[in-house]
Image (cartoon, rainbow, N blue to C red):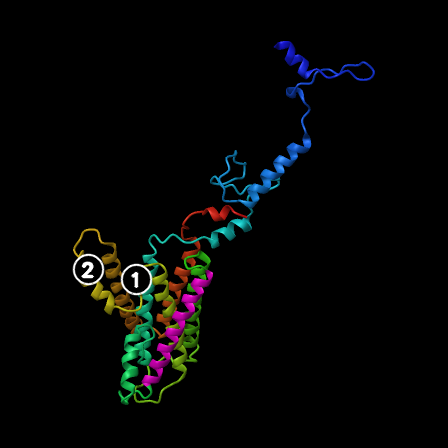
Amino acid sequence: MHNNNLNMHRQPPSSSGYIEPLTTPAHRAPDHRSIYQTELTAANSRSENPNEDFKYTQGIWSSGGSTAVSVSGNQTPEDNTVCSTISRHFRADIDTTHTDIPLIVCGFVGGLVDGLSFNAWGSFSSMQTGNTIFLALGVSGQPTTPAYLWAKSLIALAVFLASNILFVHMHRLLRPRRRSTMIISFGIQTIALLATAILIQLEIITPKPEDPRAPIEWMQVLAISLLAFQAGGQICASRILALDEIPTVVVTALLCDLLVDPKLTAKFNPKRNRRVGAFLALFLGAMTAGGLSKTTSMASSIWLAMGLKLTVTLGWIVWRGEGRRKSDFEV
């Protein structure tokens, strides 16, 4: 039997009588063309089916078990230059932990702004409930003084609504909680307060409270509009950060939600604490505006509000981010 196997593999002699040595499959020379074709087929399969689970050893630059590794081996490591680090920092979403603190500060700003606005111009800029009442009374010509109070209230309400639309769409377009989006949003609000403070400081808008019996000064509408515009940005931020219990501009619903809370007296109740903090902040803000109007110029309340809003804006720059996502590693 052994001899038969040898005969089967023995080559016939050549015409010259030379017998070629026996070549077994184990010693056959490798076919480089077939190996290259096999590798190319596997590479094409991985590129055409990127979601298929291939079992292979991760490359040095693969992240989190991702199969998105260059087949050619020419992929460079992630760029860690200063510019790329700064870019990733501002593109990251902020961590929403403790974001109730800047919103409570904004509630104080809302009290400051409305305290000044109503005391000086007889119109609200943040709390649109009062402006809605003034507008409704204007249908019947009430109150008789100051004249055209309903017009100022209508403009403030319209600007506030337009501000909500603008800020909501801006956040949706730029990604709601992205650090750069928050900075832009609060930066715009700060600029609106800065412009108002400059207008009052330069007496382009009278720094004295309005005489109810005097004709309306339409330049006041500009300041009211700027203040209403920034107030819209505040309340949008409270919704974007999912902290509806801190509306920053109203207290009616806030107090109702506080009192109907079944866990009102519980030892641990973050929402209750936020509502109480927001109410006190707004109340103290309005009280501060009244005190400042008696001791200093009208512009002092707006300058203080602008400084606080600027502090919140700068705070977003150093606010802790949510952490690096998998998408941050993808090129």
* Disc 2 element: loop
Question: Residue placed at 42% from the left, 75% from the top?
Answer: 201
Residue at screen point 38% across, 85% down: 217
Whether residue 189 can be seen here: no
- Magenta region: 149-174
Near mark 2 (Cα within 10 A), the count class, few <14, some 14-19 or many ≥20, is some
Q: Which mark is residue 244?
A: 1
Q: How far across and how far down the image is residue 92, in percent?
A: 45, 52
Residue 197: percent from the left, percent from the top?
Answer: 41, 72
Q: Residue at x 33, y 87 (%)?
A: 148
Q: Is residue 256 above or below residue 216?
A: above
Q: Residues within 10 Å of mark 1 (few under 14, many from 20)?
A: some
Residue beneath disc 2: 261
Q: Main secondary structure of the magenta part?
A: helix
Residue 152 seen in this snapshot: yes
Task: Tell me which corner region of the image, top left, top right, bottom left or bottom right, holds residue 132.
Answer: bottom left
